[in-house]
Amino acid sequence: MSLGVRNLLPRSAWWLVPPVLMVGAIVAWFALDPGFRGSRSDVTTAVTSDAFGQRVRDYLLEHPEVIMEAVGRLEARSRAAEENEAQAALKSRADELFRDPASPVGGNPAGDVTMVEFFDYNCPYCRRVTGPMRETVAGDPQLRVVYKEFPILGPNSIFAAKAALAAHRQGRYVAFHEALMQAKGVADEASALRIAAEIGLDVSRLKADMADAAIQSALDRNLKLAQALRIAGTPGFVIGEQILRGATDAATLRNLVDKARSRPPP
């Protein structure tokens, strides 16, 4: 999965921060727990701060697994809280997610299940999942697809996304999207304009439409919506009430569509 919305620590370094915080929490817990510290008089008369610190250190050295267990619980709670926030955003912003007029629609526009994809034309994982998406759409005549341009990999991606939304104004979005996803090399100004000409778009009109503030506004909305859904990289999918982050295969997409079809639409 390609990351670009925010600067993140490498995953291998995540453990360096929580244990430091957790040690402080454990020290505070020991300080407040009567079973560990004894009576108040014992603390005030017999246990100096240095001695207490030594007791905590000795305990952690003897039971280092306590720190990792606490870190694991902290991370699990954090993930659960973020997922709850994402689900709340999905419900409160359903119209923007599924029915934004600025977002191109493919598949069956009147389909009973909608699959939303957030993607970047320069994301290799997005290109890899194009095949599974095409297979899923071809095998389900009732599937509706909403395309969310999410250019997080730099200026070339932004140019390509704007060109795609401009192509939408000429009624050729899906053709342009498919061609750009299948093209080799970087999706940049040269390749986007070349593909536009190859599929019969009016390139002069395309360039003029790309400068329209409404297209930049659509990209800005997609960025904020992805952040609210905790989609920090590409590709990202929303199918019914389910959020999938990262590339996947056709079988998984079909399974998520089937689950969404068994539930009322949002």
Image: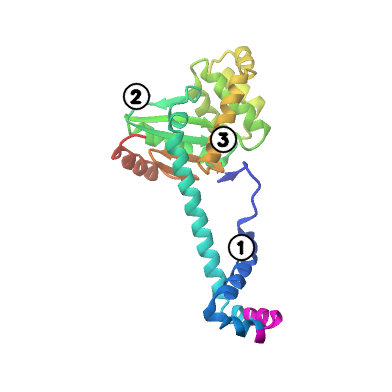
Q: Considering only order in the chain, which callout, 3 or 2, is on the residue closer to the N terminus?
A: 2
Question: Are dots 2 and 3 in contact, CB under 8 Å?
Answer: no
The residue that label 1 is drawn on is 18
Q: Which residues are magenta?
A: 45-57
Q: Position of residue 107 (x, y in %)?
A: 39, 27
**Which secondary structure lies at badge 3?**
helix
Q: Residue furthest right?
A: 50
**Which secondary structure lies at badge 1?**
helix
**Which secondary structure lies at badge 2?**
loop
Q: Nearer the viewer, residue 237 or 40?
A: 40
Question: Could you tell me which residue is drawn at 52 percent across and 27 percent down?
Answer: 177
The span from disc 2 to disc 3 (Cα, nearest Å) is 26 Å
Q: Quadrant of residue 144?
A: top left
Q: Which mark is residue 236?
A: none
> What colour scheme was applied to this rendering of the protein?
rainbow
Q: Position of residue 73 (x, y in %)?
A: 50, 63
The residue that label 3 is drawn on is 224
Q: Amino acid at mark 1?
A: Pro
Q: Residues within 10 Å of mark 2 (few under 14, many from 20)?
A: few
